[in-house]
Amino acid sequence: MNTIVYSVPKIHCGHCTQTIENELAEMPGVEAVKASLDERKVMVRFSEPATDDSVKALLAEINYPAE
């Protein structure tokens, strides 16, 4: 199991954090998600079949690209 914290500068409000958490929670292999408005970061704990690349791809797809 991997836990990675992504910097996501486009987080601007509570709606953004909720959207990110809801979308990533639906991804197979994602065990936990916590998005922070104050830090503009997203913590994701995941295992196969989710990967770092697939998490980044989903964030980009929902218009919150990770840096």
Image: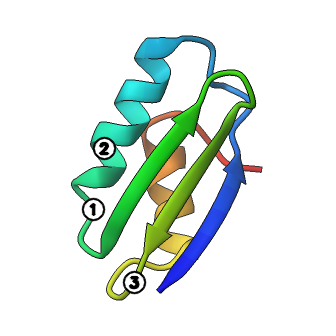
Residue drawn 64% across and 67% down? 4
Q: Nearer the viewer, mark 3 or mark 1?
A: 3
Label 2 to label 1: alpha-carbon separation: 7 Å
**Image quadrant where residue 64 sits:** top right
Using the image, tell me which numbered label, if any, was put on residue 23: 2
**Image quadrant where residue 41 sits:** top right
Q: Earlier in the sequence, mark 3 or mark 1?
A: 1
Q: Amino acid at mark 1?
A: Met
Residue drawn 63% across and 23% down? 37
Q: Position of residue 22 (x, y in %)?
A: 28, 39
Q: Earlier in the sequence, mark 2 or mark 3?
A: 2
Q: Amino acid at mark 2?
A: Glu
Q: Amino acid at mark 3?
A: Ser
Q: Position of residue 23 (x, y in %)?
A: 30, 44
Indicate the secondary structure of the residue bearing disc 2.
Answer: helix
The residue under label 1 is 27
Horizontal side of residue 28 vs 15, given as left or right: left
Relative to 17, say whether 4 is above or below.
Answer: below
Q: Position of residue 53 (x, y in %)?
A: 56, 73
Relative to 2, say whether 67 is above or below.
Answer: above
* Labels 2 & 1 near each other (Cβ < 8 A): yes
**Image quadrant where residue 10 sits:** top right
Horizontal side of residue 18 vs 13, given as left or right: left
Residue drawn 35% across and 88% down? 48
Relative to 38, say whether 6 is above or below.
Answer: below
Label 3 to label 1: alpha-carbon separation: 11 Å
Indicate the secondary structure of the residue bearing disc 3.
Answer: loop
Q: Nearer the viewer, mark 2 or mark 3?
A: 3
The residue under label 3 is 47
